[in-house]
Amino acid sequence: MVIDRLSAGHYKWGGVCEGWNLLEGSDLRVVEEEMPAASSERIHYHRQAEQLFYILSGAARFTIDGAEYTAGAGQAVIVKSGQRHKIINDGSASLRFLVVSSPSTRNDRVDL
């Protein structure tokens, strides 16, 4: 089975950001997300899920438990369950990345 942006389930988040569900199961979720320039997510944490953010294009700034990290294309950032985090696109171009979550983040997010 081949899946892409056209065949994957699409959703909007944060008002201006988009996501595509590439794989959705109770134990694993893989999404592709895109954030336009100068956009940011709200700080939050997941009760159970650990996440890997793999940057496809652009540069991302992460805040994780108060520390700052920057990752560019070909780099990944890992967020453990319970860590307060958010992703920010400070750049002038769109940011594209994959998010791999285990278990799924469905009903696991706590916004702060």
Image (cartoon, rainbow, N blue to C red):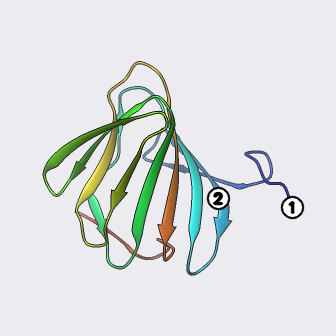
Q: Amino acid at mark 2?
A: Asn
Apparent side of residue 83 relative to residue 32 in the rendered image (left or right): left
Query: In this rendering, is residue 10 above or below 75?
Result: below
Whichever of labels 1 and 2 marks the residue nearer the N terminus, that label is: 1
Amino acid type, residue under disc 1 in the picture? Met
Q: How many marks?
A: 2
Res 21 label: 2
User: Does dot 1 land on a helix, a strand or a loop?
Assistant: loop
- Seen at 57% across and 67% down, the residue is 29
Left or right of 43: which side holds 60? Answer: right
Residue that protrudes farthest toward the top in the picture: 92
- Farthest residue, direction left: 66
Residue density around tag 1, few if under 14, some if 14–19, many if 20 or more, within 10 Å: few
Which residue does the numbered mark 1 point to in the structure image? 1
Tell me which residue sits at (73%, 45%) in the image.
5
Q: Residue at x 64, y 58 (%)?
A: 21
- Residue 34 appears at what percent x and percent y? 53, 39
